[in-house]
Image (cartoon, rainbow, N blue to C red):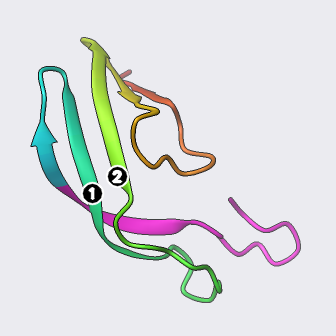
Amino acid sequence: MTEVNTKIELGCTETLQLREVRKASMVFKAVTSQPTDPSAEVACPDGNVYVVTMTDQDTLSLSDEGDQSAGAPSTLTRR
């Protein structure tokens, strides 16, 4: 998310580690987290968990099961 007045990116960039593989899902945990824009004063906690599921051959879905970031896409589709 970009702040309107300053144009500063208010998001966090995380390094994810694969923690678990299920049938059609993978569980990732953020092992590091830092502001995407270093000048932003944003608190970026470590430890968020993301569950990604392959819903069909070309689509990945971000499950409600983990810690989902506001504004993150719910699905990723290959084009």
Residue 26 locus on image (x, y percent): 20, 36
- Which structural element holds mark 1? strand
Q: Which residues are magenta?
A: 1-17
The residue positioned 32% from the left and 38% from the top of the image is 51
- Quarter of the image where the C terminus is located: top left
Taking the magenta stretch, the answer to whether it contains residue 6 is: yes
Q: Earlier in the sequence, mark 1 or mark 2?
A: 1
The residue positioned 76% from the left and 72% from the top of the image is 7
Dot 1 and dot 2 residues touching (CB under 8 Å): yes
- Is the residue marked by circle 2 packed among few (<14), some (14-19), or many (20+) residues within 10 Å? many
- Is the residue marked by circle 1 packed among few (<14), some (14-19), or many (20+) residues within 10 Å? many
Q: Which residue is mark 1?
A: 29
Residue 57 locus on image (x, y percent): 24, 12
**Residue furthest to the top:** 56
In the image, taking residue 17 as reference, residue 15 lies left or right, namely right
Taking the magenta stretch, the answer to whether it contains residue 13 is: yes
- Quarter of the image where the N terminus is located: bottom right
- Tag 2: amino acid: Val
**Residue 49: mark:** 2
**Residue furthest to the front:** 65
- Which structural element holds mark 2? strand
Quarter holding residue 58? top left
Mark 1 and mark 2: Cα distance apart in space: 4 Å
Residue 25 locus on image (x, y percent): 21, 28
